[in-house]
Amino acid sequence: MTDSSFKSGFVAIIGRPNVGKSTLLNRIVAQKIAIMSDKAQTTRNKIQGVYTTDEAQLVFIDTPGIHKPKSKLGDFMVETAYSALREVDVILFMVSADQPRGRGDDFIIERLRKVSAPVYLVINKIDTVHPDELLPIIEDYRQEFDFAEVVPISATEGNNVPNLLNVLIDHMPEGPKYYPKDMVTDHPEYFIVSELIREKVLQLTEQEVPHSVAVVTESMQRDPYDKIHIQATIIVERDSQKGIIIGKGGKMLKEIGTRSRKDIENLLGNKVFLEVWVKVQKNWRDKRKDLQNFGYREMDY
């Protein structure tokens, strides 16, 4: 039976690549479920983060950054972002205080004109600009779109994030608790483990490697001593990329594994034995079957 005073709803976070959407999601759920990288377009699926209090539950959808697609994977990412707008109670349009409004922002605003949910403008990275610079930014965006609310924040520092949550809860209708109180994401552990490994590849490699990488968690098994054995495969498109990820004498692959294992242990709360392989699958980003095998399944919009 639903508590008549309990409020709940769905919130989409949308914006250009690199404005801090994943950082905000991780801040809200106080746990790392979305990967963070300084390279654009790193979020590839909608990632649901769940924030629950005694009075309310907010389900956040972090969408891929909207950009001009250059492959079937790119098409999938942009379509995924737009599909999120059709399923939610509130849309957070996130922009960065340290970047002027650009063509990418205008492109998103045009799409937002077609949605029925209220749109909040969230101006992130306010810690990087002088407070006097905020008002012109707000005025500039307000001239382009009638936002229901404007909330300046710093996702990295946490500034004003509690206020953003309160504003969202105030807007939500009465509704059920969709997920258990202690649940922070609806994605299976296999998916999060793959994402954490992919994040380390993005952090440690340069140039052509990042967007050619997929990670598949093949197995997760608990031994009698409560240690979790995980086998995962990093997929790349070319032999040269495989060489970069393995590194001289296997050094790069070892570093990817070590960093991944620490985050996975934090996520699962157990000791982890992690084995990672690298495999070449040529042009996987443009092959529907490969995209579906590697977890990009929602190709039917």
Image (tube, rainbow, N blue to C red):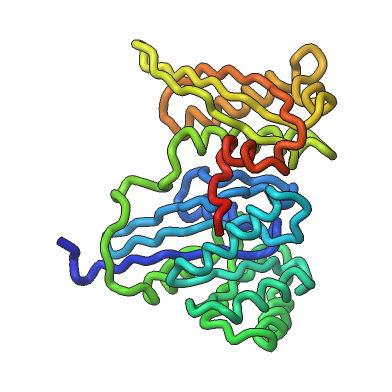
Compared across the picture, whether 190 is left or right of 176 comes to right
Which residue sits at x=19%, y=63%? 2
Which residue sits at x=31%, y=56%? 178
Q: Position of residue 134 (x, y in %)?
A: 69, 77
Q: Residue furthest left?
A: 1
Q: Position of residue 212 (x, y in %)?
A: 74, 38
Instruction: Tell me, yes or no, if residue 155 can be seen here.
Output: no
The foreground one among 21 and 298 is: 298
> For residue 157, what is the image quadrant?
bottom right
Which residue sits at x=45%, y=52%? 49
Which residue sits at x=69%, y=66%? 96
Instruction: Tell me, yes or no, if residue 253 can be seen here.
Output: yes
Q: Position of residue 154 (x, y in %)?
A: 61, 62
> For residue 241, what is the image quadrant?
top right
The foreground one among 214 and 253 is: 214
The foreground one among 166 and 102 is: 102
> For residue 67, what is the image quadrant?
bottom right
Compared across the picture, whether 19 is left or right of 103 comes to left
Query: Image height check: is 156 above or below 269?
Result: below
Query: Image height check: is 152 above or below 292?
Result: below
Q: Position of residue 182 (x, y in %)?
A: 32, 46
How many numbered marks does the figure carry?
0
Quarter of the figure that contains the N terminus:
bottom left
Quarter of the figure that contains the C terminus:
bottom right
